[in-house]
Image (spheres, rainbow, N blue to C red):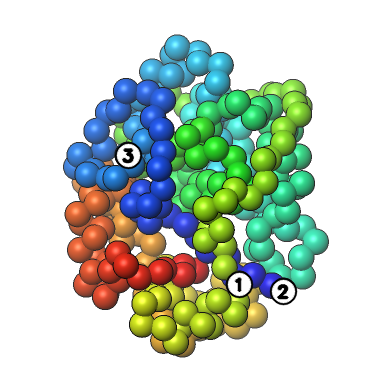
């Protein structure tokens, strides 16, 4: 049975998943107030780890190849959306199978004991985080770079243009962990959620996609699921100023969701 893809953003999971920190925290703007700030890493923290040549750190750039070649964080390897989509599924954009993800990680010299720092210039790094979490890669070994590549460059930190050459290594995934089954839901579950007052089906696409004025390439048709709530994904990040692209504080994000009737006790189904 086909499954709906759920884009699980840090703002949702930071309120629900226990994590462990590996480095001394530099406060996120505006001092975040997150339940689990160790899901994120700040540019200053990453720079220190790079300078220390920490052998456990593997940096992953989740952008198109042309952007990666134009300039990326030193030491980063590159992944793009098609790499983590099921090559054999008739519907475009579906989550890649476990074997495909394991092969991809191994080809980038990522080991089972690596700590991953994942970034992009939009939200695509969150998708990779979601897939790895779904297949059981330890949450304590993954960090999302707050503010992405733009935050790194805004600090005046160096970039490089040469692709990182790596040797393949053996990589395995533990398999779907107990307690994280909610990272993916079925179409029948979404239909059921639409009828329940304790559930919310949330559309996080652009306004144009929500209104049916724009259709994503490969989509069967334009429009949205009836009766869903719309909050565009970028509402959760700062839109202007020196911290553009960083996550808003937990309090700000909470206000945005409460204003649409999304309260902590409700189950959220995101697409």
SS category of the residue bearing label 2 = loop
Query: Is 157 or 109 nearer to us in this picture?
Result: 109
Q: Are marks 3 and 2 in contact (CB under 8 Å)?
A: no
Check disc 1 and report the residue beneath it: 186
Q: Residue at 36% across / 36% down in the picture? A: 38
Instruction: Give the image location of residue 39, x and y in percent.
Output: 40, 40
User: Which mark sits nearer the N-terminus, 3 or 2?
Assistant: 2
Instruction: Give the image location of residue 246, x and y in percent.
Output: 31, 45
Instruction: Give the image location of residue 259, x and y in percent.
Output: 22, 72
Check the image and report above or below for 78 versus 270.
above
Could you give the CA–CA distance between mark 1 and mark 2, rounded to whole angstroms?
A: 8 Å
User: Which mark sits nearer the N-terminus, 1 or 3?
Assistant: 3
Check disc 3 and report the residue beneath it: 37
* Extreme-right residue of the structure: 88
Dot 1 alpha-carbon crowd within 10 angstroms: few under 14, some 14 to 19, many 20 or more: few
Instruction: Give the image location of residue 217, x and y in percent.
Output: 62, 70
Check disc 2 and report the residue beneath it: 1
Check the image and report above or below for 80 versus 266.
above
SS category of the residue bearing label 3 = helix
Q: Residue at 41% across / 48% down in the picture? A: 17
User: Which mark sits nearer the N-terminus, 1 or 2?
Assistant: 2
Q: Residue at 48% across / 44% down in the picture? A: 120
Q: Are marks 1 and 2 in contact (CB under 8 Å)?
A: yes
Q: Residue at 39% across / 75% down in the picture? A: 200
Could you give the CA–CA distance between mark 3 and mark 2, rounded to whole angstroms?
A: 36 Å
């Amino acid at each position: 049975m086909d499954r709906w893809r759920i884009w699980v953003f840090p703002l949702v999971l930071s309120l629900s998943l226990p994590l462990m920190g590996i480095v001394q925290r530099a406060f996120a703007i505006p001092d975040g107030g997150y339940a689990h700030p160790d899901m994120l890493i700040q540019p200053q923290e990453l720079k220190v780890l790079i300078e220390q040549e920490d052998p456990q750190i593997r940096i992953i750039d989740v952008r198109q190849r042309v952007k990666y070649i134009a300039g990326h964080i030193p030491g980063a390897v590159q992944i793009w959306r098609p790499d983590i989509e099921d090559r054999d599924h008739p519907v475009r954009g579906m989550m890649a199978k476990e074997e495909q993800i394991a092969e991809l990680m191994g080809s980038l010299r990522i080991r089972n004991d690596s700590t991953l720092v994942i970034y992009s210039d939009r939200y695509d790094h969150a998708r990779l985080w979601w897939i790895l979490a779904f297949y059981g890669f330890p949450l304590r070994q993954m960090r999302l770079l707050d503010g992405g590549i733009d935050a790194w460059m805004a600090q005046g930190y160096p970039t490089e243009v040469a692709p990182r050459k790596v040797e393949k290594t053996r990589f395995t995934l533990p398999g779907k962990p107990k307690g994280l089954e909610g990272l993916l839901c079925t179409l029948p579950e979404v239909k059921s959620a639409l009828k329940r007052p304790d559930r919310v089906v949330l559309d996080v696409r652009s306004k144009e996609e929500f209104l049916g004025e724009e259709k994503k390439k490969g989509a069967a048709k334009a429009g949205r699921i009836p009766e869903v709530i719309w909050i565009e994904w970028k509402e959760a990040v700062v839109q202007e100023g020196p911290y553009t692209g960083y996550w808003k504080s937990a309090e700000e994000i909470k206000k945005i969701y409460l204003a649409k009737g999304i309260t902590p006790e409700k189950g959220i189904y995101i697409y």
